[in-house]
Image: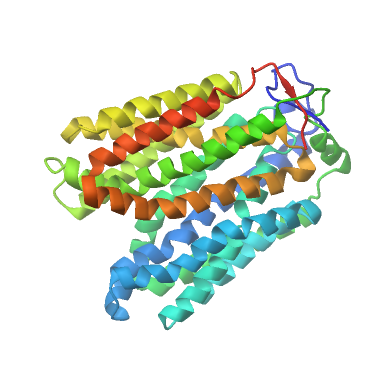
Amino acid sequence: MSADYELPDSDPPVFGSPDSGSPDPASRDRDKYEYLFLNVGHFLDHFFMLIFATAAALRLTSEWGLSYAELIPYATPGFIAFGVCAIPAGWLADKWSREGMMAVFFIGIGLSSIFAGFAASPFQIAISLTLVGVFAAIYHPVGLAMVVQGKTKTGLRLAVNGVWGNLGVASAALLTAFFIDLSGWRSAFYLTGVLSVCIGLAYWWFIRRYPEDPDVTTAKAAVNQTAGSASLWRIFAVILVTTAIGGLVFQSTTFALPKVFDERLSDIISSATMNGWYAFLVFAIAAGGQVVVGKLLDHYPVKIIFATVAALQCLLFAVMIQSEGQIALIVSIAFMLVVFGQIPINDVLLGRIVSSEWRSRAYALRYLVTFSVMASAVPLIAWIHSGWGFGRLFAVLSVAAGCIFLAVMFLPPANKKVVAV
């Protein structure tokens, strides 16, 4: 099977897909509701992974008599499972059922969260969070493969889906703190867990009540078929390299930003609460960068968009080295826009060059690399900051973005055809 590296606007429409102009309203409605389920799933995926961070900081340190530094390692097995279990999740989805795996995701992560709410010791919370990580690992290889399945224009769909995931990250601390003040830290796990289970049951009813038309499924699987040759492994290499470096850049900026604001915006920020709201505001604005890039990816060559995003990252990180005060805030918004804007690019590339029956496993490998690098970024941040400060960190990130730019230059021209696996 083969696929276009760049899909032109004139590609043949896919029967039953909303972007094909299909006259079948039932197929369009089914796709719309399934897309909503997938977006909510992305929100919950990142939300559940971060409940414990806020609960540990605000309540468990006093309730269990442990320091924040002593509590955080109990979340580590969950984050390891989040990355490692993506591979078997992708394999099961391709071999069994993507829709079935998504139902397992909603129900499994919800039950694991409820189980975490019953934890009476750090060991029990570690077991619970590991289960959360196992089920959370399902989403990226399975959900993203479903988002792009059968679509000739995937940039905007992936970008909007990515915004939901980022809102899950941004909302985790705020909503968990609200639940803690309302009825205790356990309610943050209980209530959201019950909600996820209910969504999972609703999704299971939905896919049983409205099964996809076999003719539409066949058309979706064949949407990218075309004759072509060459360049596949070069694109795979670029994707893996830029995924690894991009994971380092993303984790470094999102993790360090509150501390950067604490040091660089002291004339603007006067409290920890204000710092948190500034960080939330920057992340919320930056999420829009994904939508802009996603829309551009549907109309312009990936190579041009990717190179532009990487070049802007390189420039803005260099400017940030010496920035202070309001200038630092403005530059932070700008570089987070292009950091978030890079997120859908590799997913679009994978969706275009990998055939449907392999796509979940391809996304699993991509996110295994991403989450593995992200896990190593935190000690790197600590080491650089303790020795040289954030000026050196932004210099490193500027060089990293330059490496992404150079890697993008190895992508083949937009009109090349590649053979999909």
The answer, for residue 160, to whether it is visible in the render is no
The residue that appears at 79% across and 44% down in the rendered structure is 357
Residue 196, image x, y percentages: 57, 62
Q: Is residue 238 left or right of residue 309?
A: right
Q: Is residue 349 left or right of residue 274?
A: right
Task: Say above or below: 313 vs 213.
Answer: above
Task: Say above or below: 140 vs 407.
Answer: below
Quarter the C terminus occupies: top right
51 or 314, nearer to the observer: 314
Q: Answer with the quarter of the image where residue 6 lies.
A: top right
The residue that appears at 53% across and 67% down in the rendered structure is 193
Residue 174, image x, y percentages: 35, 56
Task: Say above or below: 64 vs 345.
Answer: below
Residue 96, image x, y percentages: 80, 57
Quarter the N terminus occupies: top right
The residue that appears at 79% across and 31% down in the rendered structure is 223
